Amino acid sequence: MKKYFVATVDEIPPGHRKIISIAGRSIGIFNINGEFFAIRNRCPHGGAPLCEGELSGFVHSPVPGEYTYTRKGEIIRCPWHQWEFDVKTGQSWFDPVKTRVRSYDAKVEQGCAIAESTGTKLEEGPHVAETFHVSLDKDYVVLEM
């Protein structure tokens, strides 16, 4: 799988999202309580820009007059027809068996690990250049597709 470095961790604070384009696909990256999740920015129902919808949660009511609000910020609502999807899994709450939105693996990697993993071996030549130590001290959100 190919890795795409989509943002630094501080670019997407908890409760927020960033919509990016990778390989012709529009994808929303969400920070839910410090964990990152990615879903396709296209509602399977009508093609709406799903990731531009409202983030919400669920209201549970075991008996009349009692309710709890759970999963705050984990459910995305389509801006056109209000279909709801789980940001963490892509599962639809309208039709969970047949309908879902594509989800992608998103994780956080340290900048120094990224710099080390992209290094290549070069053949030594006859010339010497002045070099400087470079380090990356941020964490990056990485999308694997």
Image: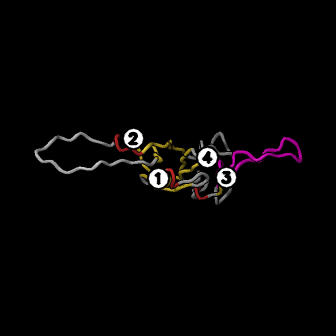
* Horizontal and vertical percent position of residue 117: 35, 40
Point 41% across, 52% down: residue:
23
- What residue is disc 4 on? 33
* Camera-nearest residue between 126 and 108: 126
Q: Earlier in the sequence, mark 1 or mark 4?
A: 1
Q: Distance between the residues labelled 4 and 3?
A: 23 Å
Tell me residue 98's x, y (percent): 63, 41
Frontmost residue, 101 versus 116 = 116
**Which tag, 3 or 1, sits closer to the chain's start?**
1
**Callout 2 touching callout 4 (CB < 8 Å):** no
Which is closer to the viewer, label 3 or label 1?
Answer: 1
Q: Which mark is residue 113?
A: 2
Which portion, as a residue range, is magenta?
A: 56-77
Alpha carbon distance from label 2 to label 4: 23 Å
Q: Distance between the residues labelled 3 and 1?
A: 28 Å
Q: Which residue bears the numbered disc 1?
A: 7
